[in-house]
Amino acid sequence: MGLLSKKDSKLILDPLADNNPITIQVLGICSALAITAQLKPSIVMAISVLFVMGVGNVVISLMRNIIPSKIRIIVQLIVVATLVIIVDQVLKAFSYALSKELSVFIGLIITNCIIMGRFEAFALGNGVWRSFLDGIGNALGYGVILIIVGFFRELLGSGTLFGLKVLGDPVEKTGLYAIGYENNGFMVLPPMALIVVGLIIWVQRSRNKALIED
Amino acid sequence: MEHLELFFKSIFVDNMVFAYFLGMCSYLAVSKKVSTAVGLGAAVIFVLTITVPLNWLLDQYLLQEGALSWLGEEYASYDLSFLSFIMFIATIATMVQLVEIVVEKFSPSLYNSLGIFLPLIAVNCAILGGSLFMQSREIETLGLALNYGFSSGIGWFLAILAIAAIREKIRYSAVPPALRGLGITFIITGLMAIGFMSFGGMLTGGDEPAAKPEETSALIEKEKEEKQVESKAEVSLVDNLNKN
């Protein structure tokens, strides 16, 4: 990372693991879990949040000295809502089926707590470039969890990745299915998203004892 | 009948937390003690009951395609629905602020119990989610919108009350250290969600000779669109069962 100083690269790398927005800060779970039954919507969601957070952090950081602190929540909400409308319209224009599948969850990026949380905690008090990096870092940390959950749920639940039958054909009994493997239909149901995240937290905290709560 | 059905459906079948994971952030953060959970739950019911009908009016008379026709013929072709995110969130933020001021003036005791939770609620996904679902499900009348807001609020309240009670008790259990706190809460919520799925048969299960066929099929179509993922899972479950 020749481009970034050590402090700056920490801004991006920290949220990926030890300060992950979902597993450690417990932010932004709301709009995340319902759409992770498959890999593709998870990635689209991750990219949408990346865009909204990167741009949003920059905008808030630019305005940080002129926003009256009493109405800052409303100002932040308006900024996010505008960006989310852009994302929503782009999705509707270029990938209508996917936008139908994500239904209200694109709109719910507005109230995604990571975004408001980073605005409050970082963009309001830091310069433009650092805010941008912080936004990108946190959005990546969020996206990584989304993609991990989406990967396991699609692979174990439907035996596919991006709709490709990677484990063979369940109807014609090829690949793994030939030796009696069955899809776990349970993985596709919404509650399993929570349990998969719970297990990710378990793995992460077992590896890093400092994160364990009392 | 319509009202009763929507009421139970929004509380149990389409529970905000267990079916759609809405409002998870505050659900996880404020569920350590039953008393605070009750406070936040009550505030959510309150705000949802106010904002959903309000946004319904906005949607009907301002945002939908052709909604502006009450202004005159020339406005009938306008479709402002792309503005709905920003309108809804602005309504919610202002209503929350307004409710806070009114409650503080007229009922200081209620304000003291709800007070700290009200500002939190503006960014609670369940509130915006309520309005967005109201819009995407095309709820027909103001009364139904009111009902929907109130009953989904109750659903959320029940969820946070239940998890808070469980978390108070789980302190005495031997949970693996790395799972303590957040991890186990996630897993319990998942298990509770599985439990709540059994309510799914409450309205669709059994034989329904009374329902009009075209109406139900339209409903089923819509449900399918919304819960595409879920139905896929059911299909594959059924497939597996058949094979066995």
Image (spheres, coloured by chain):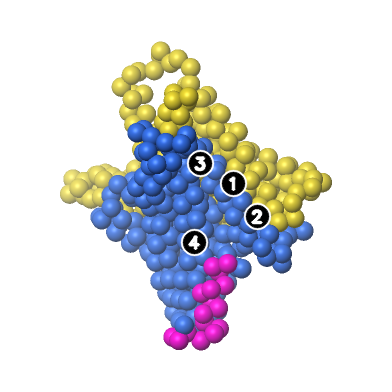
Do callouts 4 and 2 point to residues on the same chain? yes
Do tags 1 and 2 sit on the same chain?
A: yes
| Left or right, B137 with reference to A144 | left
Magenta span has B240?
no
Q: Label 3 to label 2, Cα distance in Å?
A: 18 Å
| Residue found at x 42% / y 74% | A59
Q: Helix or strand or loop: what does disc 1 sit on?
A: helix
Say what secondary structure mark 3 lies in: helix
Q: Are marks 3 and 2 on the same chain?
A: yes
Please state the horizontal and vertical placement of residue A53, each as a whole percent of the image: 45, 67
- Tell me which numbered mark, 4 or 2, is placed earlier along the sequence: 4
Q: Which mark is residue A202?
A: 2
Determine the chain carrying the residue at label 4: A
**Gap between marks 1 and 3 measured at Cα:** 10 Å
Measured in 3D between alpha carbons, the distance from the residue under mark 1 to the one under mark 4, in whole angstroms, is 17 Å
Tell me which numbered mark, 1 or 4, is placed earlier along the sequence: 4
Residue farthest to the top, as pictured: B209
**In the figure, the yellow chain has which letter?**
B
Picture residue at 25% right of the left edge, 56% below the top: A94
The amino acid at mark 3 is Met
User: What amino acid is at disc 1?
Assistant: Ile
Task: Residue under label 3, please give it.
Answer: A187
Query: Magenta residues, as a range?
Result: A2-17
Answer whether residue B244 is visible to the viewer in this image: yes
N-terminal-most mark, 1 or 3: 3
Which tag, 1 or 2, sits closer to the chain's start? 1
Q: Are the residues flagged by discs 1 and 3 in contact, CB closer than 8 Å?
A: no
**What residue did someone put label 1 on?**
A195
Residue at screen point 61% across, 51% down:
A199
Q: Main secondary structure of the magenta part?
A: helix
Tell if the residue under mark 3 belongs to the same chain as the one under mark 4.
yes
Sort mark 4 into few (<14), some (14-19) or many (20+) by Cα contacts within 10 Å. Answer: some
